[in-house]
Image (cartoon, rainbow, N blue to C red):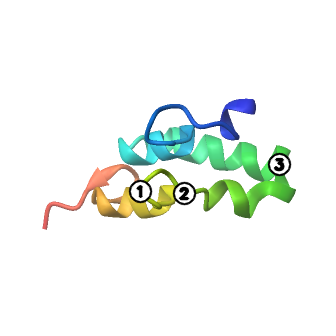
Amino acid sequence: KKALLTYTNEEQATALHLAANNGHYLIVEKLVSWINQDLPSMKDELLNKLNKYHFPPLMIACFRGYHTKGKKDEA
């Protein structure tokens, strides 16, 4: 669970950022579940943590076009 709290690379991305960026919705669901269960007092901070470019994980997923379950919007 410590990985949820730390940045993983030079872009200051967390595990949640990386999963959202790559459309891994099952991993995103699992990470969010762990946050809700094990770190409820830090939920807002972890779900809204900004990377180097000041993007939270959800914004990255939307920017990449992963609107539903990791699939890009082809429209």
**Amino acid type, residue under disc 2 in the picture:** Leu
**Is residue 3 shown left or right of residue 10?**
right
Nearest to the observer: residue 61 or residue 52:
52
Say which quadrant the C terminus sits in. Answer: bottom left
Task: Kindly state the secondary structure of the residue where label 1 is placed.
Answer: loop
Q: Kindly indicate the quadrant of the structure image that contains residue 72.
A: bottom left
Task: Kindly state the secondary structure of the residue where label 3 is placed.
Answer: loop
Q: Residue at x 36, y 49 (%)?
A: 70
> What separation in Å lies between label 3 and label 2 (alpha carbons)?
18 Å
> What separation in Å lies between label 1 and label 2 (alpha carbons)?
7 Å
Q: Which mark is residue 39?
A: 3
Q: Residue at x 84, y 55 (%)?
A: 40
**Is residue 32 shown left or right of residue 50?**
right
Q: Judge depth for marks 3 and 2 and give the one in front.
A: 2
Residue, disc 1: 53
Q: Position of residue 3 (x, y in %)?
A: 67, 31
Q: Judge depth for marks 1 and 3 and give the one in front.
A: 1
Say which quadrant the N terminus sits in. Answer: top right
> What separation in Å lies between label 1 and label 3 (alpha carbons)?
25 Å
Q: Earlier in the sequence, mark 1 or mark 3?
A: 3
Q: Residue at x 27, y 60 (%)?
A: 65
Nearest to the observer: residue 39 or residue 48:
48
Q: Position of residue 71 (x, y in %)?
A: 29, 51
Question: Quick one: which residue is furthest to the bottom in this view?
Answer: 75
**Amino acid type, residue under disc 1 in the picture:** Tyr
Q: Position of residue 25 (x, y in %)?
A: 46, 46
Could you tell me if the residues under marks 1 and 2 are in contact, i.e. CB atoms within 8 Å? yes
Residue, disc 2: 50
Residue 1 in view (yes/no) = no
Q: Kindly indicate the quadrant of the structure image that contains residue 11.
A: top left
Q: Is residue 66 above or below residue 75?
A: above
Q: Residue at x 47, y 61 (%)?
A: 54
